Image: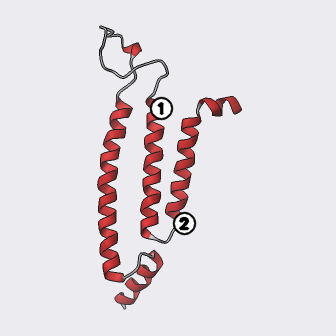
């Protein structure tokens, strides 16, 4: 077990980061802290994908020195997924922050429980 953990330390770190982000997302009341937790979870997923896509001893899939064997290169799909995920994550974060600003301007708080109580009061 111990030797396997040391060879897969990147995956273990990604799982720990994901757990930190998930617990932050679930336990925090502040909307900004929830957004930070979601970004930590995103980063953990990107780290996991990058770790799974890396093959020791192989290089990026750019043909140099006329080496055309696929055994010499890593799979480029995980790197493409990570780049696409980062772009989507930035967009989602910008949207969440803009909605948080709107909520703060309307309810003068970032506490989710207070916003929920004010919404219930408005509904009555």
Q: Position of residue 12 (x, y in %)?
A: 58, 40
- 25 and 104: which one is in front? 104
Q: What is the crowding at mark 2: few (fewer than 14 residues within 10 Å), some, or many (at least 20)?
A: few
Q: Quadrant of residue 65?
A: top left
- Is any atom of residue 1 visible in this view? no
- 4 and 56: which one is in front? 56
16 lies left or right of 43: right
**Comes first in the chain, label 2 or label 1:** 2
Q: What is the crowding at mark 1: few (fewer than 14 residues within 10 Å), some, or many (at least 20)?
A: some
6 lies left or right of 27: right
- Is any atom of residue 73 visible in this view? yes
Q: Secondary structure at mark 2?
A: helix
Q: Quadrant of residue 32?
A: bottom left
Q: Going 35% across and 27% down the picture, which residue do you hit?
A: 76
Residue 104 lies, with reference to residue 72, above or below; the image says below
Quadrant location, the N terminus: top right
**Total number of numbered labels?**
2
Mark identifier at residue 1? none
Q: Position of residue 38 (x, y in %)?
A: 44, 56
Residue 90 lies, with reference to residue 53, above or below; the image says below
Q: Which residue is mark 1?
A: 52
Residue furthest to the bottom in view is 124
- 78 and 56: which one is in front? 56
Distance of label 2 from label 1 (alpha carbons): 30 Å
Residue 98 lies, with reference to residue 19, above or below; the image says below
Q: Going 40% across and 85% down the picture, which residue do you hit?
A: 118
Q: Position of residue 15 (x, y in %)?
A: 55, 45
Q: Quadrant of residue 122?
A: bottom left
Q: Position of residue 60 (x, y in %)?
A: 36, 23
Q: Which residue is mark 2?
A: 27
111 lies left or right of 64: right
Q: Going 33% across and 21% down the picture, which residue do you hit?
A: 61
């Amino acid at each position: 077990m111990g030797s396997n953990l040391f060879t897969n330390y990147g995956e273990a770190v990604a799982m720990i980061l994901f757990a930190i982000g998930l617990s932050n997302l679930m336990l925090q009341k502040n909307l900004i802290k929830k957004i930070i937790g979601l970004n930590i979870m995103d980063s953990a997923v990107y780290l996991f994908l990058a770790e799974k896509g890396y093959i020791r001893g192989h290089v990026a899939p750019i043909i140099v020195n006329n080496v055309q064997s696929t055994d010499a290169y890593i799979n480029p799909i995980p790197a493409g997924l990570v780049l696409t995920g980062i772009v989507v994550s930035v967009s989602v974060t910008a949207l969440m922050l803009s909605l948080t600003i709107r909520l703060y301007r309307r309810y003068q708080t970032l506490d989710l429980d207070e916003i929920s109580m004010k919404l219930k009061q408005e509904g009555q």
